[in-house]
Image (cartoon, helix red, strand yellow):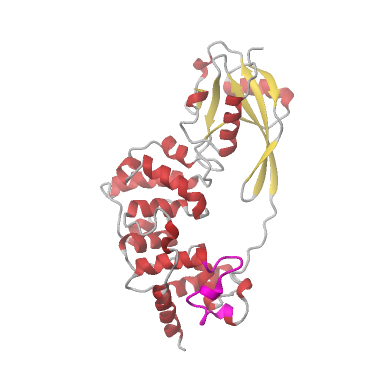
Amino acid sequence: MKPSECFDDFSQLLLNWHNPLPGRNLPWAFEPDPYKVWISEIMLQQTQAATVVPYYLRFIEKFPNITSLINASIDEVLNLWTGLGYYSRARNLHRAAQLIDEQHNGQFPANFDEILALPGVGRSTAGAICALAYGHKAPILDGNAKRVYARSFCVDDEKDSQRIRRLWEISDACTPAENCQKYTQHLMDLGATVCTPRNPKCEVCPFRSLCCAKNANLIEKFPLSKQRVIRKTKAVTFVIALDQYHRLLLERRPSSGIWGGLWSFPEYPGDIENVQKWFQQNYAMNITIVQTWELFHHDFTHFRLNITPLIVQITDSEPDQFRQADIDLVSLDKSLNRGIPAPVLELISRINSTQFNTQH
């Protein structure tokens, strides 16, 4: 069989596949609104669909269209992203909305290159938006598509760049000019429900008779596993500072790096006996130590963060005079109306439920 015929057969088999879970009942499946497709595709980057669903529903309820997102503040966007991780996605969404307002008169673009130019949108995401929202022929290569294509055509190039280039060539050859929306949705569904990373359901796969990996009994080999990353450990002390009115001191983190743009506690890098001097130098406030909570950890992709919460009282009678642009004293009941990292959110909830006296 000629390669082109094989690609054509793959496309036709996938289009004819009677998927028992079309769209997997996901709230964004077959949604023709490009704005909603865009939101879902950004959220699905590096995050499983089951995790995304409640975040997507809350986000669309708050920002039902591009105009509402254009008018939103970065804090409002980050607030709804709390717990979803990879916060640069939220910052890029907000930035992209401003560009859509400035460059496209507030209308989501329909051209592939214009979509690709938006912050946070890569080639596969742009392709998915074009295919699912507009029905344009546009290949994709998300995690599910990579696995399906790698197994179906035994793509095993040792160098990652060569493998990715080959997979893009296959994706482009297989993607049909017609029915691209249906093809793309079926491809995503096949990878998510049938051609799964472990224990794939080959017996119900529409491509089982032609699958290279299946016929060679090499299913578990594909796609090639990434080299395991040794997770490093970092330690930090969160200084949880409350004033006499039980307001909490939060500061906005730099836009780059972990938790970029989110509001968090001051992070103290040294020995606790010097924390009062450090706090006075950096925040122009005097504090007394109240108590230390037990260390806990929060895992990132490449490292584990060991966190020691230190509760302190701000002893200045009117600390408002020391406020800076990225430092704020916030009532506990209003502290959650902004973007906050998950472990910080957990500690704020604990503060609300803990009865300790910060007056002595």
Residue 217 is a magenta residue: no
Give the residue furthest to the front: 20
Indicate left or right for 215 with 73 as reference. right
Residue 353, x across and y down, in percent: 60, 25
Residue 202 is a magenta residue: yes
Give the residue furthest to the left: 105
Pick the front one: 218 or 106: 218
Indicate left or right for 173 with 203 as reference. left
- Does 324 sit above or below residue 31? above
> Is residue 122 in sight in this rendering?
no
Pick the front one: 112 or 53: 53
Pick the front one: 230 or 80: 80
For the C terminus, the image quarter is: top right
Give the residue furthest to the bottom: 1
- Does 92 sit above or below residue 150? above
Residue 243, x across and y down, in percent: 57, 17
Q: Residue at x 60, y 22 (%)?
A: 241
Count of numbered badges drawn on the protein:
0
- Does 46 sit above or below residue 198? above
Q: Residue at x 71, y 31 (%)?
A: 294
> Is residue 21 in sight in this rendering?
yes
Query: What is the quadrant of residue 72 in the picture?
Result: top left
Residue 316, x across and y down, in percent: 58, 12
- Does 247 sit above or below residue 95? above
Query: What is the quadrant of residue 19 in the picture?
Result: bottom left
Residue 85, x across and y down, in percent: 53, 45
Query: What is the quadrant of residue 345 in the picture?
Result: top right
Q: Main secondary structure of the magenta part?
A: loop
In magenta, the rendered stretch is: 194-214
Q: Residue at x 40, y 53 (%)?
A: 27
